[in-house]
């Protein structure tokens, strides 16, 4: 495997302009993240302090092994929803190391609306548990939630992937033999009571922790019984009378220390075996990525330059270097793990689609996880390409992507448009993890294309009704569509809606992929099998 | 910070983590690259950042003894579960500990007896001197550990008091 | 000088029982065995794992209600000597070494007592009689009042001695039960307290008082007599560095003496010993005031803890001399044969915490690396794997250094103290090192109150941040629960470190 020879001119005006632009975007992203993590109304913080409770991130610091990485997922979930008033969707999720075990951590954030579950909170938790299922990751639940946010109950209660899915996923995990521990740090009311109840182990804090189907006010309303929180579902009652909780703790710190000791008892996973070698830093610095990514979504750039900033030693074995050149395929190592990489260098043609499908089959045959680096405007359109069977060649790629048994990881590096999103293992294709870069865009087609198409339909309807439209009439139709489209194709909207697993500063991508790969190997890799490839 | 060592009367919170090559010490919001390599006859070489320090180390239970630059130190490890459980639970004042090793000359109280703050509970002898142990508060004696004539080590529990009712 | 007149095979004993423990048992056995004699030792089970028991040709277990009680049980010890055929008993120091009844019982059993005659012990063991005897001989003694002389007027007479004064139990020794009175108003109170302590320690409440000399030096003289009319002194030792009336550092020659004073004090000591035709090794202790006056304090009729410094500068094996005398030989040399060379200092290694008013410490001896090097002597009875308990005196070893002069000895001691590793039980080595480097000590300008006047020497020095970091690093890496948590982290995450996205 030889080193990619970078052709980048880091002294060029273009590089510097890009770098400045993308560094600003990264800084904006960091600032949004900081605000989501830290900025809370003082009265909420005061209330928690008075109760002797820690903030969600302080709990994380106590829970995680010191000096180890934590990959937070969907840090900006709900940042474009609920008027921006539910930072992080009122919960924290991520993958970290606890007592030497890689675990999924899901923590309620009591400093946001008492940790109430919003629709996107549920979506984020369900996704975290899906990740735990797919990657067989043990789960630590840090329970601190006021329960479902009642005004929006219709959007979080009954549907397949709504609230019930949290508990269903817990049961599935348990059935798979993947262990869970809950730490009850606040009230677990109604549905929330099932989180600790469905865990293999749970710890409850005396005084602040409580578990009950209905809290004292509801009990009084229902039966007239008057009972205190502690007597109804407090630490000592549950650990000595009901057996609903296992370990009593005198403080949050102690509860978390007990949880760490519980995780230390978990069985060590037997990881799926894939090729691995001693890791090596990339030869080219990750910070070059800022100068590689163009300022305009429509500007093309060489994805091999990106690979050179992610791969160990910047080394890459390119497959079919002269065929289907708009899709780069090849092998590299990331944090020592051998991976196959599919990266877009232009629109997908017939040959590039066939090359991609073939390479995915190779990776499955030699048990090599696959990384998709997306910058795709879609499959090529037009009579010539339809005649050559662009649909059936695209179908082959989608079939290979869908049926791939090796873990897949997707990074939305830049554009992710149309069926290209599918062919490059978009959200619907069960990549184990999917991340987006701040300037990336995701939609069925480009915003201007879409606005033009919509405006065109409208104009033709009007013309049928015998109306003629001036340029300004057309602009009045087109511009709002364009604005709305642009907002919804932005990476911030994508990440707000949890269409990804979180936004990444590009320089963090190598580490995020390393952690993702390591996590994915907790699940066994099945032998390859596919449906029908349309020949 | 979960782990702690008690050195003299002071408690120091620390964490240990592994790095690519060796270990890191987390202390006072600082990170230090550290490692320990065994030398001959019980001596060892400690690396701390750029420094290489000859040390001798011995362990006994939760005690770690370290000889460094002519001085020996005793550090008492406090397991997070013990430390946090103690922090949340009973008060240390319920146990009256021996201030130094010695022997009991006389015991003035019996279990179950009510005593006043300042009342003499026990007279001990150490270092050719008599020391009287007095009650730190009004209390009921829960238990008396030694009879007169018996010897004890430093920090041995001489007497214990019934826990105080928590102020509501 | 260490040769014997008659071959050892002609001695009336071929086996010597050491009625002691710890470093002195080891010290005596070393000479006994080097002479080709058999060395036996008695031991209480608390001492089963000590060096003396290990090196002795015979080790005989003795019982007691307390460990100390066992070593004070003369009948058991004599029985032990008989059981192993020991023809001599060496009592070491402390325990029964100055017990007239024991001495008499040993000799009555037909066993040689390695020490003075019973009446000599008796005389010198009673501080009051000893003082009067010495005074009558024309040797200097400090102003005093003795209760026994006329108990009714004791307090009144004590008052006349004037403050500051020192109350001592008549039967006492080693600093036990002594009280300084600076305010005559509390005299009566202090007398009662001293009496109660005397009763408890010695079963004897009789007291005496003497003038308390401010900032005195403690200078003592080693003497040897054969009980056949020959007495020599083996120079002085200065033992002024004390804590709680107990010696910590002893040296010879004394930096306080010029040749004239040395001659005078050494001859006074020899004269006192000569006046009773002393048999064996003994030590005459003097109190030496800042103006150069000295007064008789007491005579110890046994081998002293600090005897090695005398051995180091004179080359005389004092235990060998004791055995020769016990065997009935005459002194093999005269005063002019006794020469000294160099400067020797002894540092007592105590299991104690200097910073906590020298509180004794206890604990297992997990690791022991005695210091090594030319001119470095390590007299110790403890072994790695052994344990320091509160059952006995906290002195666990003695470091003796010999230099060509005092500065050389001090410099060697600094290195030896630094290199002394004893883990598991706090010792005073670091304190001794601080003391050793104190300007007043280096200048030889000390007195018995020196440590009380300079408490900063005993205080724990502030820990530097670098040392604290090193300690925590070493401790963390040596603590299984911490190391296990660190080692459990997978390679990838260990290499990545505390990354956050």
Image (cartoon, coloured by chain):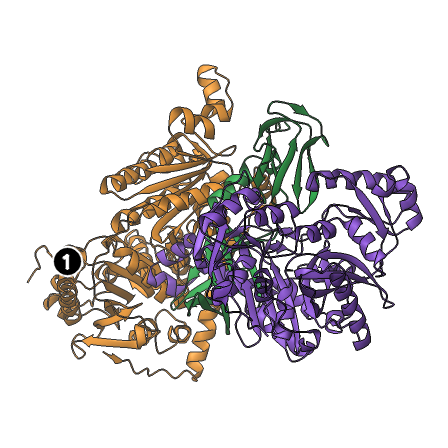
Whether residue A373 is situated above or below residue A135 in the rendered picture: below
- Residue B90 point in image, percent of width and height: 56, 34
x 19%, y 64%: residue: A368
Q: Closer to the camera, C329 or C84?
A: C329
Check the residue under mark 1 and report the chain it is in: A
Query: In the picture provided, is A336 more to the left or to the right than C229?
Result: left
- Residue C304 point in image, percent of width and height: 65, 60
Q: Closer to the camera, A166 or A425?
A: A166
Whether residue A40 is situated above or below residue A71 in the rendered picture: above
The quarter of the rendered structure image containing the C terminus of chain A is: bottom left
In the rendered image, what is the letter of the chain coloured orange?
Answer: A
x 26%, y 73%: residue: A345
Residue of label 1: A399
Query: In the picture provided, is C162 more to the left or to the right than C245?
Result: right
- Rendered hue of chain B is green
Q: Closer to the camera, B32 or A290?
A: B32
Extreme residue in the top direction = A224
Label tally: 1
Query: In the picture provided, is A156 more to the left or to the right than C93?
Result: left
The quarter of the rendered structure image containing the N terminus of chain A is: bottom left
Q: Closer to the camera, A435 or C190?
A: C190
In the rendered image, what is the letter of the chain coloured purple?
Answer: C
Disc 1 element: helix
- Residue A54 point in image, percent of width and height: 53, 44
Whether residue A359 is situated above or below residue A428 in the rendered picture: below
Label 1 CA crowd tier, 10 Å (few <14, some 14–19, many 20+): some
Whether residue A491 is situated above or below residue A149 in the rendered picture: below
Q: Which quadrant of the view contains residue A335?
A: bottom left
Q: Which quadrant of the view contains residue A388?
A: bottom left
Res. A219 visible in picture: yes
């Amino acid at each position: 495997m030889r080193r990619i020879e970078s052709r980048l001119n880091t002294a060029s005006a273009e590089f510097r302009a890009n770098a400045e632009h993308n560094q600003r975007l990264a800084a904006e992203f960091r600032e949004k993240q900081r605000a989501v993590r830290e900025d809370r109304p003082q009265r909420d913080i005061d209330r928690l302090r008075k109760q002797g409770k820690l903030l969600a991130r302080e709990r994380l610091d106590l829970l995680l092994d010191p000096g180890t990485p934590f990959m937070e997922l969907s840090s900006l979930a709900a940042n474009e929803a609920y008027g921006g008033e539910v930072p992080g969707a009122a919960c924290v999720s991520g993958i970290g190391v606890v007592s030497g075990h890689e675990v999924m951590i899901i923590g309620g954030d009591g400093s946001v609306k008492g940790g109430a579950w919003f629709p996107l909170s549920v979506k984020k938790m369900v996704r975290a548990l899906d990740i735990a299922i797919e990657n067989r990751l043990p789960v630590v639940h840090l329970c601190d939630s006021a329960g479902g946010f009642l005004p929006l109950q219709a959007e979080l209660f009954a549907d397949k992937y709504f609230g019930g899915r949290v508990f269903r996923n817990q049961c599935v995990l348990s059935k798979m033999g993947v262990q869970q521990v809950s730490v009850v740090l606040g009230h677990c009311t109604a549905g929330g009571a099932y989180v600790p109840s469905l865990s293999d182990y749970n710890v409850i804090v005396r005084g602040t922790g409580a578990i009950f189907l209905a809290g004292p006010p509801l009990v009084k309303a229902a039966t007239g019984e008057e009972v205190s929180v502690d007597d109804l579902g407090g630490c000592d009652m549950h650990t000595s009378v009901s057996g609903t909780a296992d370990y009593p703790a005198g403080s949050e710190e102690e509860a978390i220390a007990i949880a760490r000791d519980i995780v230390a008892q978990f069985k060590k996973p037997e990881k799926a075996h894939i090729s691995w070698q001693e890791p090596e830093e990339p030869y080219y610095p990750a910070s070059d990525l800022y100068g590689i990514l163009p300022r305009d979504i429509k500007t093309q750039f060489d994805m091999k330059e990106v690979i050179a900033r992610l791969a160990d030693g910047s080394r890459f074995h390119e497959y079919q270097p002269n065929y289907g050149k708009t899709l780069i395929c090849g092998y590299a190592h990331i944090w020592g793990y051998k991976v196959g990489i599919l990266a877009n260098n232009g629109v997908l043609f017939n040959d590039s689609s066939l090359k991609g499908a073939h390479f995915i089959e190779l990776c499955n045959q030699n048990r090599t996880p696959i990384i998709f680096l997306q910058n795709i405007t879609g499959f090529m359109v037009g009579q010539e390409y339809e005649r050559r069977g662009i649909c059936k060649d695209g179908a082959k790629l989608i079939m290979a992507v869908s049926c791939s048994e090796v873990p897949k990881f997707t990074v939305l590096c830049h554009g992710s448009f149309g069926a290209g999103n599918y062919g490059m293992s978009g959200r619907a294709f069960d990549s184990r993890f999917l991340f987006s870069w701040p300037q990336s865009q995701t939609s069925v087609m480009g915003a201007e294309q879409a606005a033009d198409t919509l405006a065109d339909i409208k104009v033709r309807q009007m013309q049928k009704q015998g109306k003629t439209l001036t340029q300004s009439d057309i602009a009045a139709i087109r511009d709002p569509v364009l604005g709305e489209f642009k907002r919804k194709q932005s990476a911030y909207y994508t990440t707000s809606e949890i269409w990804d697993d979180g936004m990444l500063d590009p320089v963090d991508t190598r580490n995020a992929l390393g952690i993702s790969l390591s996590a994915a190997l907790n699940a066994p890799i099945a032998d390859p099998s596919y449906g029908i490839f349309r020949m | 910070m979960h782990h702690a060592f008690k050195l003299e009367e002071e408690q120091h919170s620390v964490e240990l983590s592994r790095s690519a090559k060796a270990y890191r010490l987390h202390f006072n919001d600082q990170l230090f690259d550290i490692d320990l390599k065994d030398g001959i006859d019980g001596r060892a070489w400690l690396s701390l950042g750029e420094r290489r320090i000859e040390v001798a180390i011995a362990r006994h239970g939760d005690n770690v003894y370290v000889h460094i630059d002519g001085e020996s130190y005793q550090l008492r490890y406090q397991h997070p579960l013990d430390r946090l459980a103690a922090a949340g639970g009973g008060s240390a004042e319920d146990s009256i500990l021996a201030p130094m090793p010695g022997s009991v000359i006389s015991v003035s109280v019996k279990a179950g007896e009510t005593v006043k703050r300042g009342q003499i509970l026990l007279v001990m002898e150490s270092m050719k001197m008599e020391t009287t142990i007095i009650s730190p508060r009004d209390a009921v004696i829960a238990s008396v550990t030694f009879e007169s004539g018996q010897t004890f080590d430093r920090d041995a529990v001489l007497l214990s008091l019934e826990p105080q009712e928590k102020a509501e | 000088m260490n040769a014997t007149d008659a071959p050892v095979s002609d001695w009336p004993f071929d086996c010597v029982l050491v009625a002691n423990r710890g470093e002195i048992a080891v010290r005596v056995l070393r000479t006994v065995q080097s002479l080709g004699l058999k060395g036996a030792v008695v031991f209480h089970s608390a001492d089963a794992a000590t060096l003396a028991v290990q090196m002795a040709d015979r080790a005989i277990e003795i019982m007691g209600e307390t460990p100390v009680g066992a070593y004070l049980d003369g009948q058991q010890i004599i029985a032990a000597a008989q059981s192993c055929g020991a023809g001599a008993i060496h009592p070491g120091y402390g325990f029964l070494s100055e017990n007239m009844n024991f001495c008499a019982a040993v000799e009555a059993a037909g066993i040689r007592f390695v020490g003075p005659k019973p009446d000599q012990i008796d005389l010198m063991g009673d501080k009051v009689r000893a003082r009067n005897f010495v005074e009558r001989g024309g040797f200097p003694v400090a102003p005093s009042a003795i209760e026994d002389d006329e108990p009714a007027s004791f307090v009144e007479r004590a008052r006349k001695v004037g403050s500051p004064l020192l109350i001592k139990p008549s039967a006492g020794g080693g600093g036990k039960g002594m009280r300084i009175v600076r305010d005559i108003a509390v005299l009566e109170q202090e007398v009662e307290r001293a009496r109660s302590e005397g009763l408890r320690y010695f079963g004897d409440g009789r007291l005496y008082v003497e003038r308390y000399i401010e900032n005195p030096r403690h200078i003592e003289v080693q003497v040897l007599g054969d009980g056949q009319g020959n007495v020599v002194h083996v120079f002085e030792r200065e033992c002024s560095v004390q804590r709680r009336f107990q010696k910590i550092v002893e040296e010879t020659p004394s930096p306080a003496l010029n040749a004239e004073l040395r001659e005078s004090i050494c001859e006074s000591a020899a004269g006192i010993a000569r006046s009773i035709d002393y048999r064996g090794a003994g030590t005459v202790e003097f109190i030496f005031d800042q103006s150069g006056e000295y007064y008789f304090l007491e005579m110890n009729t046994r081998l002293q803890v600090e005897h090695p410094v005398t051995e180091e500068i004179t080359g005389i094996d004092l235990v060998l001399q004791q055995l020769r005398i016990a065997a009935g030989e005459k002194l093999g040399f005269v005063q002019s044969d006794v020469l000294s060379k160099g400067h020797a200092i002894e540092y007592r290694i105590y299991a104690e915490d200097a910073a906590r008013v020298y509180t004794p410490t206890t604990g297992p001896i997990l690791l022991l690396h005695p210091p090594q090097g030319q001119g470095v002597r390590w007299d110790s009875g403890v072994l790695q794997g052994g344990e320091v308990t509160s059952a006995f005196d906290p002195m666990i070893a003695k470091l003796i250094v010999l230099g060509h002069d005092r500065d050389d000895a001090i410099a060697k001691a600094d290195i030896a103290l630094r290199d002394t590793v004893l883990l598991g039980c706090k010792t005073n080595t670091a304190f001794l090192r601080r003391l050793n480097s104190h300007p007043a000590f280096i200048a030889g300008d000390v007195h018995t109150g020196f440590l009380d006047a300079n408490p900063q020497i005993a205080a724990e020095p502030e820990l530097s941040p670098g040392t604290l970091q090193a300690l925590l690093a070493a401790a963390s890496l040596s603590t299984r629960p911490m190391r296990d948590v660190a080692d459990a982290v997978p390679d990838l995450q260990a290499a990545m470190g505390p990354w956050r996205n």
